Amino acid sequence: MKRFLLKVSIFLIYAALWYTLFPMYIDPFNVFHADNIRANGVMPNKNYIKMKYILAHPDKFNTFLFGSSRTGAIHTDRIIGERCYNMLYSTGVPRWHLENIKTFFANKIYPDKIYIGVDSVSYTGNYAAQVNDPSRCPYEYLISHNIHFLKLYLDPVKVFQSLNTMLSALMGKVQVINTEAFYKYGWDIPYNHPSNIDWEDPAQVEPVFGYGKWDEGYRNYDVDIEDANISSNVDESIDYVLNILREISDICRKNNTELVIFTNPMHHVTYTASVREKKYFEFLEGLAEITDFWNFSSLNDITLSNDCYRETSHYKAKIGDLIIDIMCNGKTYPELQAQGFGVKVRRENVKDFLGMLKAQLTPEE
């Protein structure tokens, strides 16, 4: 009997090590090392880590930029006179921006200004997929769903699957995150970041909405949640997202925080597909009813140039500088502005502006 109990005890200890200490030590998504992330080649859970970092350093920044990974090209340290941190994370959407902003205010963090970059990803994000993805599940969801947190990050199988990527990072075969820039600025697209596709290959030059290609295995968790907007696998409606942006506008106004919304300059392939398939102009018209915004998406010399993009989803850091110049430094580029890049859109001019954008399109678009 004693031998049996000893074997059981050894097994339980082994199981505890396998299911807790091993995932916590390896920690491919860096949630257990949020204050000192490792550059291991695996995409960290940026929203969770950044929120923990800001809450631990409430006075370090007075301005924040929210958006998807596309806003990672905006080097916020180049905004003169502001201590701006880039809160970007992959497929970041307004719903989770709102939750983050509410958390700021609830913890007495009152930014002077908040920037939000939007585009077609803003209303095509799949919430059920996001909360089942260890790299993308947002901070507020994780801290309020402890069991889900454990299922995502104490899964030895997922940890084991990540080891190959981590080994490749050690050997210099995959790109790793700049951990210093992560905490200091938040952005993650350096100036020397090369384009990673063959622009001559039509199969690689395709429009990108929401997730694109990612590990389907992350969808296999059962999400125990009452919120129908998350349990649904249907893309969120434009009206739903516009209501979220309206709430963000209202809560910023009540807390004396200036809100600046802008559209990311989508590559022309993704832009035209967003107009044709995703009702992008409808989104812009609704947005103008809520607040003024800066527009950078159209068919212009920037979006029509492959040299300005890493691929059809992400623009390069040099374009982020142009956005800063226009929005923050008062610079104008008349030729680009005439093409719709860097135009301030308001309720009063939105119909004329959309008419100009429609005139740029070919009949089939």
Image (spheres, rainbow, N blue to C red):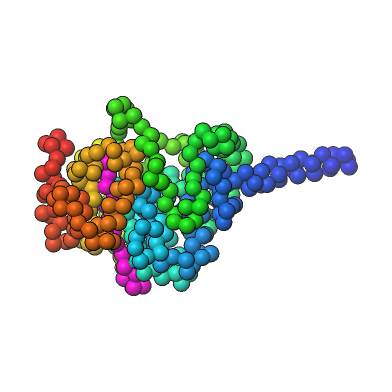
Residue 30 at x, y percent in the picture: 56, 49
Camera sees residue 162:
no
Q: Residue at 40% x, 41% y: name it.
A: 193
Residue 34 at x, y percent in the picture: 56, 54
- Does 274 appear above or below 61? above
Residue 244 at x, y percent in the picture: 33, 59
Q: Residue at 11% x, 48% y: name it.
A: 356
Q: Is residue 264 left or right of residue 285?
A: right
- Does 82 appear above or below 195? below
Name the quadrant of the N terminus.
top right
- Does 211 appear above or below 145? above
Camera sees residue 346:
yes
Q: Residue at 60% x, 42% y: name it.
A: 155
In the rendered structure, which segment of residues is drawn in magenta?
253-267
Residue 17 at x, y percent in the picture: 71, 44
The quadrant in which residue 360 appears is top left
Q: Residue at 84% x, 42% y: name it.
A: 6
Name the quadrant of the C terminus.
top left
Near-viewer residue (123 or 318): 318
Q: Is residue 79 left or right of residue 31?
A: left
Near-viewer residue (25 or 168): 168
Near-viewer residue (146 or 355): 355
Magenta residue check for 259: yes
Q: Is residue 157 left or right of residue 122?
A: right
Magenta residue check for 44: no
The total of numbered circles placed on residues is 0
